[in-house]
Each structure stands twice: as C-alpha cells, then as structure tokens.
Image: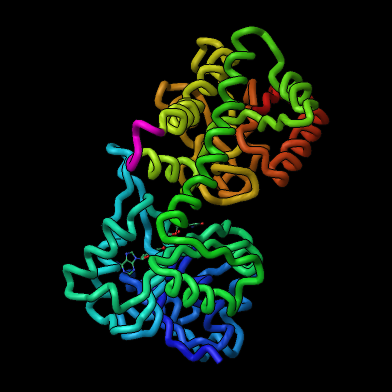
Amino acid sequence: MFNKKICVVGIGYVGLPCALMLAANGCTVAGFDTDEQKVRELNEGKTKLEKELQAVFETEEAHRNFSASTKLQEADIFVIAVPTPIDEDRKTADLAALKAAVKSVASVIREGNLVIVESTVPPLTMKNTVIPIFTESGVDCGKIFLAHCPERLLPGNVVREITYNNRIIGGYTPEAAELAADMYRLFVKGNISLTDDTTAEMCKLMENTYRDVNIALANELSEVCLALGIDVEEAIDLANLHPRVNLLKPGIGVGGHCLPIDPWFIHEVSPYNSTLINTARHINDGRPGKIAAIIRKYVSSDISQKFILLGQTYKPETTDIRESPAAEIYEILKGEGYSVTAYDSEVGSGKALLEEIRGCTFAFVLVPHKRMLKELEECLARMKETGEQIPQIISF
Ligand SMILES: NC(=O)c1ccc[n+]([C@@H]2O[C@H](COP(=O)([O-])OP(=O)(O)OC[C@H]3O[C@@H](n4cnc5c(N)ncnc54)[C@H](O)[C@@H]3O)[C@@H](O)[C@H]2O)c1
C-alpha cells in the first residue's frame, strides 16, 4: 500500500496529468500552483482538459484524492513540473520558476521527503542549482531524497503517453531513484530505467537534440538540392533504399516548445563540444526565412498579388502555434507588405477557407492538417464548378 501524500508543484500540461494519475491510483495529491485562476478553475471543474484526461479527472477516486491550491502544504513527495523556458537572447535555460519552486519546497520539506524534478533542465541542474538552494535554505540534502524524472509526454494524447511511455529516473542517490520509481509504478506501464540525476537530465535533451539535428540535415540537403536543381524528395527516397540510411523529410522548420529549445540546454553547458548541435539549431531556425524566399520567387515582385498560407501551427493535427515556423513565415511576408492571408483549420481564423482562398493566385500548404487538405479539395472542386480562378497549390 503506497500511502504517501504527494504535492505536485506546477499543475500545467505536465504536472496536472501526473497529479491526476496519482490521485486516480489512490494517492492523496495536492496540486500547488502560483496561478490563482488556474487553481480556481480546476477546483470548480471548469478547466478544459483533453477528453481522456477529463475522464480521469471525473473518476470518483481522483475527485476524492485531488485538490488544487495556491498554498504549498507539507507532503511526503514533491513533484516539480514548472516551466523552464529559454532566455531568447542568451539561448540559455531560464530557471527562475524552478528556483522559486525549490525555494517554496524548502520552506515546508521534512527529513526523509522525496523531491522529483520533472521539468526539462540543463545537465547538472540538480547538483548546481537545486541542491545549493536547499542547502542555502538550511535543508540538509543528505537527509532528503532527490531525483530527476524527465517527462516525455506529447500533448494531444497525454493519458496514453503518461501511462505507456518508458521512463528514465535519475537519482541523486540510488535510493532516491528507487523511491521515485515506486511512485511512478503506480500508473506507468512502460519500462522504468534507473540512473543518476545528471544522466537523466542529459537523456531528455539528447532525445530532442537527436530529432533536431536529423531534421537539420534533411533541411540542409534540401537547400543543396534546390541550388543544384535536384528533386530532393526523389533523392531522399532513393538514398533511403540503402539498408542503413534513414533520412528524414525536409520541412519548413522546427517548432513547439521542446525541439527548438532543448538542444540549447546542452549547448549552454558545453559550447565547445556542441558545434554540430549549435549549427543544427541555426539551420532549423533559418528555415522559415528560406521558405519565405521560395514563396517570394513564386509570387514574383508584384506584392499586390493575393496568396494564402495554409497551416499556422507548429506541426500537423495540433492547435499549438508556439514557436511555429509557419506563423513566422506569415509574419515575414506580411511584414514585407505582401497581400498574404493565413488559414488554419485547427486554430480557426474566423472566415471559411473558400472565402479566404477566392482571388488567390497561389496557396502554399505549410502544415498539412488532414481536415484542412480535405477542405481545400472541396473548395477547389466548388471553384472549378463555378468557373472561378483556381490558385496554384504548392506544398512544402
Ligand atoms: N508541455 C509538454 O508537452 C512538455 C513535455 C515534456 C516536458 N515538458 C517540460 O515540463 C515542464 C513544465 O512544462 P508545462 O508545459 O507543464 O508548463 P505549463 O506552463 O503548462 O505549466 C507550468 C505550471 O507551473 C506554474 N508555476 C510557475 N512557477 C511556479 C512556482 N514557482 N510554483 C508553483 N507553480 C508554478 C505555472 O503557473 C503553470 O501552471 C517544462 O520544463 C517543460 O519543458 C513539457
């Protein structure tokens, strides 16, 4: 019987699913957040959650065991899931929220408690940031347990992801890793691997860096192919016939709140050893500008020519526009005075696609949402029927 009281510090995209899964599995869970409105809405049941997470929230057990508060209470285990954004100018992690969260926990922590950091952090954050804050606050870190357990979940399917994804748990001591694993085993059905805190911090960043660097390679190859007049898609398909090659498809850039950010957390701690990572980041960050240049070539110098960009989110089938390269392309072209509109079936622009696309000479598909492609097909069929001018469709 696991009868520990758990406090989840930061009940956002990551913290709330963890808190609810623990509550639905019999733990008493207090969600602590500094956002008063978020806490109020949660307690009043007004928060908009994904369907499956809502179902967990509404279980009798979760209802009985979970409560949210703006006041931090004592607990046996503290799970910290606060934001760790990037300082855009310095390209380093902004750990202000994490530092504040650790300070709050330090004010209520007792001997024998376990603290798990779930936030994505640069390697050595446990040793160089978390532990010194506890020590300065008078907490003896030899008498508490500390672990880092990075979260890999993807919004859109959180209950499935949080249940079946494999987890890495890095303990500051092996005992801390074991204790944290006991908690996660309550709801995780994926494999749980134990390691030390710094390795766990690094693993999470390596996963996203692996994706970013491989995408950068595909994007760079596409730029070389463009310059040489080679069809990059055909070249990649043929190269991938090699048994040990698996090139990704080039795209319009990299977005969201993980891939464009996490590689910098490696670079900041070891810049001289991470030149490839640095270069990949610049290649992917430069993609929207390169795509805008390709679009300019299509629409010629006549900036009054009307055209439309289809898709504004950072990837297909999401409503998330954070760090979206498609949104950046729109901003570049709009800023130059082009007669450009943007439409996204998932975000909703107000007007119907048919209305937006009328009179356009080009429609550039930046993010191929399935629903939007179907709408596009229907619009084109309708315009054909009525004899209207059909825009040329260019897909990236
Ligand atoms: N969202 C994802 O899909 C995802 C996936 C993997 C990892 N992560 C990482 O998880 C961490 C949390 O991200 P998120 O998306 O859940 O962020 P979020 O913004 O959705 O939620 C964080 C919550 O923490 C609260 N908060 C901020 N400072 C606080 C403090 N001092 N004390 C208590 N609460 C505080 C905020 O009010 C907010 O409600 C980040 O490090 C992120 O990089 C996120």
- Can you say whether 362 is above or below 167 in the image? above
- Which of these two is toward me, 139 or 233? 139
- Which of these two is toward me, 392 or 366? 366
> Residue 351 at x, y = what percent?
59, 44
Q: Please give the name of the residue rendered at 29% of the width and 55% of the height, measured from the top-left corner.
A: 95
> Residue 197 at x, y = what percent?
41, 60
Left or right of 288, for residue 130: left
Q: Which residues are magenta?
A: 268-273
Residue that lies at the very extreme toward the front in this rendered image:
174
> Residue 329 at x, y = what percent?
49, 29
For the N terminus, the quadrant is bottom right
Question: Quarter-wise, where is residue 366 in the image?
Answer: top right
Left or right of 244, for residue 25: left
- Can you say whether 201 is above or below 55 in the image? above
Residue 28 at least partly seen: yes
Residue that lies at the very extreme toward the right in this rendered image:
385
Magenta span: helix, strand or loop, mainly?
helix
Left or right of 12, for residue 192: right
Image quadrant of ligand 1?
bottom left
Q: Is residue 271 magenta?
A: yes
Q: Is residue 10 magenta?
A: no
Left or right of 313, for residue 15: left
Q: Please give the name of the residue rendered at 23% of the width and 75% of the height, measured from the top-left corner.
A: 140
- Can you say whether 308 is above or below 208 in the image? above
